[in-house]
């Protein structure tokens, strides 16, 4: 949680005034990490997206919502199931 809080302040301080390509790339990076095989990466990226400011999400809001909603579903493969990743995806949606 401390890393997520730190990311929020970092983005507000250093990235909001930069070009749209940089912020779009950052959003795309975290969206791609939502499907990473490593559960810790999936958990963290969902929480991180939840603290992104409006400016980062506005251009890709539909992709963000669809991807986070997809992460809330129970995985078919029992080896990939992770309740905490789904909880974090819900937190990302509601924040």
Image: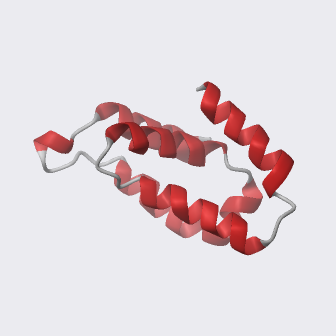
The percent position of residue 28, horizontal first and vertical second, equals: 55, 65
The image shows residue 10, relative to residue 19, as above or below, that is: above
Nearest the viewer among 64 and 20 is 20
Quarter of the picture holding the C terminus: top right
In this figure, which colouring scheme has been used for the structure?
secondary structure
Quarter of the picture holding the N terminus: top right
Left or right side of 43 for 81:
left
Nearest the viewer among 55 and 7 is 7
Left or right side of 89 for 50:
right
Q: Quadrant of residue 33?
A: bottom left
Left or right side of 45 for 40:
left
The image shows residue 26, relative to residue 1, as above or below, that is: below
Nearest the viewer among 3 and 87 is 3
Residue sitting farthest toward the top = 2
Residue at image location 76% in from the left, 61% down from the top: 55
Residue at image location 13% in from the left, 48% down from the top: 77
Q: Quadrant of residue 23?
A: bottom right
Residue at image location 76% in from the left, 43% down from the top: 10
The percent position of residue 64, horizontal first and vertical second, equals: 53, 61
Residue at image location 65% in from the left, 69% down from the top: 24
Q: How many marks?
A: 0
């Amino acid at each position: 949680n401390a890393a997520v809080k730190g990311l929020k302040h970092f983005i507000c301080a250093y990235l909001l005034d930069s070009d749209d390509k940089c912020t779009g790339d950052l959003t795309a990076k975290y969206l791609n990490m939502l499907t990473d095989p490593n559960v810790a990466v999936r958990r963290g990226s969902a929480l991180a997206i939840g603290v992104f400011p409006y400016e980062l999400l506005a251009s890709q809001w539909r992709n963000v919502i669809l991807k986070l909603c997809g992460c809330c579903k129970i995985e078919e493969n029992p080896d990939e199931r992770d309740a905490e990743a789904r909880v974090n995806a819900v937190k990302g949606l509601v924040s």
